[in-house]
Image (cartoon, rainbow, N blue to C red):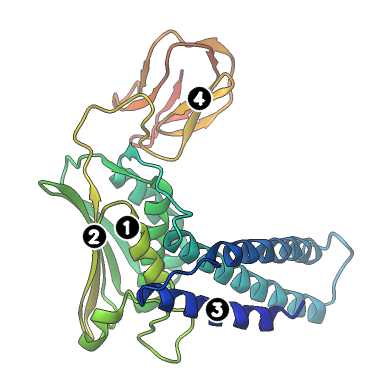
């Protein structure tokens, strides 16, 4: 397969498809195109897996030159896979293949976890990443996977555009009707003339820049799918702020809601948990709530049925709790 040629063809078709939607045309072939991209992604992923094995010397030792060539191919495969994923995201949001899975969760804890995943890269670049919020912040009702992707995408953009010695600040603000999240970086800013087009598909501030120009378009689609709003503000040469809103959860937390992506395994089912866990021993679940023995933070809820097996570390104080 001529991968480069196929991707160029996909890019052209996708641009036409997105343009058609903005022009109000109906594209019945979207699903076929969606499946084509999906099937194209599978061999790329498989090839990358074999390349990884080669680079790990699983098929014999490599010379330095061979390793250099394979690393280049591996990086190219990663870039292709990333592009295909973005194409699928666009078609999913545009063609209604993607629907939010609404749950209630603590967005402050989610942001904190995401920041932890980028801190090493930020430190290597000499950039500080800060989280600021005023307690208490209500839980939000949103799709945790979509929100994670949005925040990660915006933080990645901020890292790319913030110089060494700069700062990225994530603000979480509890408002009357929603929760506002702002990601502010002390980078070079965006020209005022670019702001109205920043969320358009394939738009790039720097015409010769890397990337597909799809990231912010996908972010906007994901936020709007959840009933939120997103906008960009910038002082050229000084800072950029990207803000979005999420629905505030007003009711009582249900047993099925979660405060993070981590879970407590209970018999052959999964129930929400708050904290990292490790297998310990079987015991009967005799209560509905499990709280940290040190700070009283709610760690998990169960329905009181079946058997559980876990040792949970509290994400607030670090205490290990046997439950």
Tag 4 secondary structure: strand
Residue at left 51%, top 31%?
277
Compared with 285, 21 (above or below) is below
Give the residue pinned by disc 3. Answer: 13
Residue drawn at (46%, 66%) of the image:
90
Between circles 3 and 4, the one closer to the viewer is 3
Which residue carries the number 4 mark? 311
Sequence-first tag of 2 and 4: 2
Question: Of the residues under marks 3 and 4, which one precedes in the sequence?
Answer: 3
Q: In this view, does 85 lie to the left or right of 237?
A: right
Query: Are the residues at dot 1 and dot 2 in contact (C-beta closer than 8 Å)?
Result: yes
Q: Mark 2 points at which residue?
A: 229
Q: Do the residues labelled 1 and 4 touch (CB within 8 Å)?
A: no
Q: Which mark is residue 223?
A: 1
| Side of 305 where 151 appears, left or right | left
Residues at marks 3 and 4, CA–CA distance in whole angstroms: 51 Å
């Amino acid at each position: 397969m001529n991968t480069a040629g196929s991707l160029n063809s996909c890019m052209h078709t996708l641009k036409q498809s997105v343009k058609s939607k903005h022009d109000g045309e109906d594209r019945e072939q979207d699903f076929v195109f969606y499946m084509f991209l999906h099937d194209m992604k599978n061999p790329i992923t498989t090839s990358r897996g074999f390349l990884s094995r080669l680079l790990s010397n699983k098929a014999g030792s490599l010379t330095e030159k061979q390793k250099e060539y394979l690393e280049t191919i591996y990086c190219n495969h990663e870039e292709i896979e990333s592009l295909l994923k973005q194409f699928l995201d666009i078609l999913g949001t545009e063609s209604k293949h993607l629907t939010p899975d609404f749950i209630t969760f603590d967005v402050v804890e989610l942001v904190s976890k995401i920041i932890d995943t980028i801190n090493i890269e930020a430190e290597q670049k000499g950039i500080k990443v800060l989280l600021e919020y005023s307690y208490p912040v209500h839980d939000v009702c949103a799709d945790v996977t979509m929100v994670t992707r949005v925040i990660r995408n915006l933080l990645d953009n901020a890292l790319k555009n913030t110089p060494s010695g700069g700062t990225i600040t994530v603000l979480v603000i509890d408002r009357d009707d929603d929760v506002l999240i702002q990601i502010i970086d002390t980078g070079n800013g965006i020209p005022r003339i670019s702001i109205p087009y920043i969320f358009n598909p394939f738009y790039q501030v720097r015409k010769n820049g890397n990337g597909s120009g799809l990231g912010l378009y996908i972010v906007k689609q994901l936020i709007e799918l959840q009933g939120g709003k997103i906008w960009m503000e910038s002082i050229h040469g000084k800072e950029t702020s990207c803000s979005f809103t999420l629905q505030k959860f007003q009711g009582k937390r249900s047993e099925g809601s979660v405060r993070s992506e981590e879970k407590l395994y209970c018999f052959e089912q999964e129930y929400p948990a708050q904290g990292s866990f490790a297998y310990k021993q079987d015991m009967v679940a005799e209560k509905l709530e499990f709280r940290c023995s040190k700070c009283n933070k709610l760690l998990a809820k169960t329905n009181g049925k079946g058997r559980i097996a876990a040792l949970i570390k509290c994400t607030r104080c670090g205490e290990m709790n046997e439950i």
